[in-house]
Amino acid sequence: MVIDFSTFGSGPAPTPTDPRVLFDALPERAARYEFLRDPQGQVLQTWYDRRSEKDLVVKLNTGGGKTVVGLLICQSSLNEGVGPVLYLAPDPYLASQATEQAIELGVEVTDDPRSARFASGEAICVLSLHRFVNGKSVFGLQGDGRPVFDVGTIVIDDAHAALATVKEKFTLTLSRDQHKESFDELLGMFADDLRQQSEITYQGLTTEDSSAVAPVPFWAWTRRITDVTAILNKLRDDDELQWSWPLIKDVLPICRAVFTADKLEVQPPYPPINKIASFARARRRVHLTATLADDSVLVTDFAADPQTVGAPITPTSAGYLGDRLILAPQEISASIKEAAVRGMAAKLAEQVNVVVLVPSHYKASAWAQYADITASKSEEIGAAVARLRDGHVGLVVLVNKYDGIDLPRKACEVLVMDGLPQIYGGQTRREAIVLGDSDEMANRQLQRIEQGMGRGVRSANDHCVVLLMGPHLSRFIAAPRYRSRFSPATRAQIDFSRQVAVQLAGQPLEKIEGVIAQVLDRDPNWVAAARGALGEVTYPQSTVSAGAAPARRAFDQASLGQYAQAVTHMSEAVAAATDETERGFLQEQLAAYQHFVDEPKAQQVLVKALAYNPAILRPIAGVNPTKIKPTDTQAVLAAGYLASTYADRNEFLVGIDVLLDELVYRPVQKQVPIFERALERLGLHLGFEAQRPELVTGNGPDVLWATGGLKYLVLEAKSGASSDKIWRSSVEQLAHSMNWFHELYDQSCSATPVLLHPINKLEYNAVAPPGTRIITSGTMAQLSDAVRKAMVALADAGSWSDPEAVATQYRAHHLQAEGIAQRFSVTPR
């Protein structure tokens, strides 16, 4: 070998730092990367001008090429000497996708954080967040004695999805099956406190009722924190806990603990992300996100600077997106059944690739007869996506995967979303119960829906028909207050699609199929109209709620034991909350910090919080039950409630569909809290006063209706039952609720005991209270049918706010208060 020394001594060739120049200089990039898209060039220029700011948010439409932008930012930072550089993806599948794109670009990457090329700033390290955020991270943890790996620049892809991964990593989960002795010891330790919150819920834990979700009161948690620490510390080397224990052990006193039937989850209010010192010390942190307007969660969970988060980097136009037709067939015509939509999707799959996103295996089973592939595990999904991108497959069902998959061009020309993403963990289920229909919960759902709908449109040249199944999804595009929160481009496509839906109103499924064919066949008039709908769309300014920064500061101060300062900051966050339900939840956290400073005052704060949100923790002294009674006639109350709840006909009809869908008996215990909430709302729709005593006070029935004339219905919900008989425990619970009623209400009031259960056959030794009625699956269907017919008539006449019209329809469909329980129920046998 002969070395040409004439090239030595002249120094390395200059490397560009401007990412647009850098892109042009990449010598080995694949043919499909011939040029940067205009939106990519725009955001790269703005990032380059602002690159000295530590926290920057880059927003691009779903499918706008965020990964390429992120990789060019990484390489630019390397060239500038702001390395080592780390590119983080939410999961291993997305990390592998980013690696593939980097190779196609001709950018050197590694997936080995110990690589000398990475450490020396010569290669970008692409990792999933699972490998970066964990208790044994090779990057080191703050305060664990190991050296911390210095990182200059961190780019986080799909930051909103990444946050879910981060919260999961900062959650300690103690499985009942795997750690029975420790679980039982902890459950026994808090038994009295859990029973004080709700005896029924505690009994659910002991009988392993999967619907039970029981938060440990913060005062009980802090009182026993030494014992808790000792139990968990013994398990620090456990196969599962070793990944989470080091991350949360230092903030254990301020963590929230929630028991479910199968696990204990311990989670801090926000991730103590500074524990990952490499993240905290990075000189540049870039968050790549889609286009949702509310970025408060980046401030609360990633401790990002609210000023820079509030000034995101965006292209000048948001219209650079493939065309989509977004339809909800069952909203177009109530006569269209789910089975028919599935059949149509299967027929379309004979010609094009159809991808179906479902939230659960239960939902996936309904597609089993049509599916060519059903995938749920990461490797299965990866293989299915690869096949779709290679050519025609048919109908592919993906379980609980709403983000992180690219299905461009013909990989997915029809996308079906069948049902809302589900909530599985104890902490998230508890938040769903407490936050209900609040803006916070709606925003979380909207993010998943938008991500899901974006799977089939990855560039301006793509097209996709999106079909939404189920009333819950229909509600998010029908109700203006939800629709307005989608990204501008998606909202423009929804608004345009709704114009199409208006022309299809009441038409059979065959007509909808004909319009879908126009889209798939690329009807020139459709293409022109669809692209015209995006013509003037621009990106909005980000919203960072006024309470996000003080809430994060409060947590950071509490993490350091500075509880008085934490109370001050958390008070600011509470004062900034505009949604009452969310305010109550934040006030519960304020009380938890206050407990370290002034225990009696913490209880007073909790009492005040109940006025905003009755579903939060109950104070030590408990909550006195409040009596209810109608303040007007049934028709007046019903019309007032309907008028205040629904803004227009579409929202009204979809809202009724959502309500009645939640009142279907399903053998899924985790759905029972949703059923109970819907049962309370049904009472309000019917013009009754309604409350949930067991939720609010920890005692009494699931739901109580005051139907007028000093008459009441005591309602116990067993909608998740799957047995062929009513167990003795169920009727005993109903009897207990009747005793509660008689203790609270005087003899002038009368109550009918009502059990909601799929069947009316009692166990041989079960004795129901006198006068018990059973609303079975059959009679609930009759009640739902009557409600639907009455509401449709009111909607068609536009008279749901008119008490006289309401009274007429309720009489016509036998929904008047007197005798309603008897009409839609049967006696036990």
Image (spheres, rainbow, N blue to C red):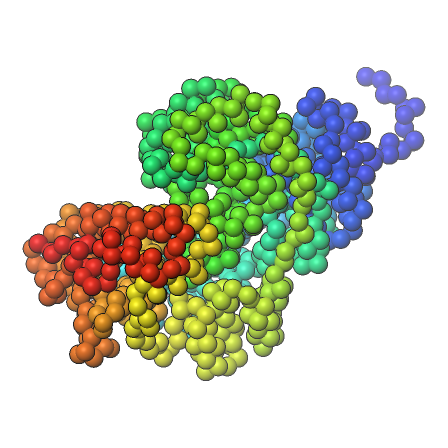
In the rendered image, the quadrant that contains the N terminus is: top right
The answer to whether residue 31 is left or right of residue 759 is right
In depth, the one of 704 and 598 nearer the eye is 704
Q: Residue at x 35, y 65 (%)?
A: 637
Q: How many circles with numbers are drawn on the protein? A: 0
Q: Residue at x 41, y 52 (%)?
A: 798
How far from the left and from the top, in percent, is residue 158?
60, 43
Q: Can I make out residue 330 in this image?
A: yes
Q: Can I make out residue 285 in this image?
A: no
In the rendered image, the quadrant that contains the C terminus is: bottom left
Task: State whether residue 242 is above or below residue 614.
Answer: above
Q: Residue at x 18, y 64 (%)?
A: 753
In depth, the one of 253 and 296 nearer the eye is 296
Q: Quadrant of residue 458?
A: top right
How far from the left and from the top, in percent, is residue 780?
23, 50
How far from the left and from the top, in percent, is residue 33?
70, 26
Q: Quadrant of residue 83?
A: top right
In depth, the one of 9 and 206 nearer the eye is 206
Q: Residue at x 68, y 55 (%)?
A: 310
Q: Hey, which residue is sitting farthest top in the picture?
A: 1
Q: Quadrant of residue 77?
A: top right
How far from the left and from the top, in percent, is residue 613?
43, 68
The answer to whether residue 418 is left or right of residue 52 is left
